Amino acid sequence: MSALKKLAGDTMIYGMSSIVGRFLNYLLTPIYAWTFVPDKFGIMSNLLAYVSILQVFLTYGMETSYFRYASRHSKPNLVFGTALGSIALTSSAFVLLVLLFSKRLAGWVELSDHPEYVVWMGLTVALDALSAIPFGRLRLQERPIKFAFFKLVNIGVNILLNLFWILLCPRVLAAHPQSFLRYFYSPEIGIGYVFLSYLIASVVTMVLFIPDLSYRNLKFDGSLLKEMLHYGWPILIVGITGMVILNIDKILIPELITGGKDPKYELGVYAASGKLAILMTLFIQAFRFSFEPFLFSHYKNEASKKVYSVIMNYFVIFGLLIFLGVECYIDVLKFFIGSTHSGYHEGLSVVPWLLMGNLFLGIFYTQSLWYKLTDQTRYGALFSIIGSVITLVINVIFIPHLGYLASAYGFFVSTLVMTLVSYYYGQKYFPVPYELKKLGLYFLVAIALYVIILLVKMDRLLYTLGFRTLLFSVFLFFIWRNERSDLIRLVPKRIADRLKG
């Protein structure tokens, strides 16, 4: 249990930067939704979808390779220097290509009038790739406080710049056109200030890392790099296909929407509604930040498989709590993406599918321990390819008929299939005694409560929220009744004694 307590503690600290920090960033969504019409939101979502795929491409599995080799190598600084040098070289080449072909790339993503958007995001992607290894080093050294601080600085700078350019400047200049702020703001840039904010935040983060990068004894080993690339290329496939599963819909929707609908408008509605599933995404991200180093640090422990099983139990429990929580209070949360008349609420039907799809994606990531620990990362690549193919097929076939709902269905089906296939092979090569009956029961209870939410309609919002709070409490009580003994062991002894009493 001491290992679980440490994992829980690190997850909370990493979560402070990922969940609390990103939640603050998430609060920008209502600003975008109440400031920009859906088609502008669609432009932003479309470009960021490309960016997310490029971010994975530019790190090409090197972060996971760094974890694997630095945790076992006699000279971890050599591993760090090799990984950092490799990414610095490839990121520099990428920036050069973006600068040379910015106009052509802008035309490709239908931003011919603003090639600077492409340049800004290209620089951002390169800087984020470069910072991935220093961030990974902090995680491997189990320094979650510093990790969280740097992440929060990045997010804080991004938020402040968004508030400055999107809220403050337009309002001040509307009242005082001759204000000094006119030197810092141009209405023509518009939504481009979102991208510029990302870039400046990434620059600030790299500046913070300068002291950690100035090691005179930092060296590069070509033969070691070959080993790391060989280990990491399947992780690259996993990462790219994973981003395809998560973001290809935002690329395909503008191309496949038919029936006279505005493609960018439809994408804006879908992307904004998807923001309501962000709590699940942030939970998974915070968990992964702490779980992966924990995984490599404890894999030799004889009781590790039992620990992994318990971890899966709690992962599913917290994931289902998020699913039910969002659905119970969707009638309030929906105002984060604009007013009733903005058009964004048209897409709320995708939220449960995206929430559950993200939960299964998190389960898949948690299961991925078996092929990482056994150095069979090719299986991870295979599973992700299967998921991405399913996603692509469902999107291409059904978007013209079902619109963005097809993307939500495709995401859910692909993550479910990936999880099932990974479990099947995992039990052959690295069997973990997962408590499937218990997990299945939790899913059944959660889905039953969700069906009741759908069926029971009330005239007043207050009555609706009260009834759904009761349903949520039922699920909490059910979990407590089944997990009480283990939950008590995870808290400090003084509190545990009170709970037992």
Image (spheres, helix red, strand yellow):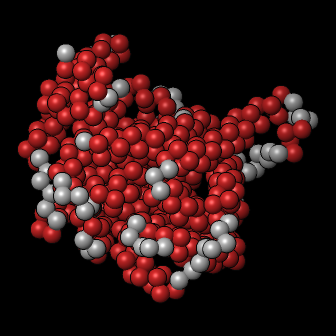
In this orientation, does residue 213 appear?
Answer: yes
Q: Position of residue 163 (x, y in %)?
A: 68, 37
**Left or right: where 27 falls relative to 271:** right
**Label tally:** 0
40 vs 68: above or below = above
**Left or right: where 179 falls relative to 305:** right
Q: Nearer the viewer, residue 305 or 474?
A: 305
Q: Position of residue 259 (x, y in %)?
A: 40, 53
365 vs 375: above or below = above
**Left or right: where 262 falls relative to 422:** right
Quadrant of the rendered image containing residue 293: bottom left
At x 67%, y 54%, the residue is 208
Q: Nearer the viewer, residue 310 or 428?
A: 310
14 vs 105: above or below = above
Quadrant of the rendered image containing residue 441: top left
Q: Quadrant of the N terminus?
A: top left
At x 15%, y 57%, the residue is 432
Q: Residue furthest right?
A: 178
Q: Residue furthest bottom?
A: 223
Q: Residue furthest left?
A: 437
Q: Position of residue 39 (x, y in %)?
A: 55, 48
In this orientation, does residue 403 appear?
Answer: no
At x 53%, y 64%, the residue is 133
Q: Position of residue 67 (x, y in %)?
A: 42, 65
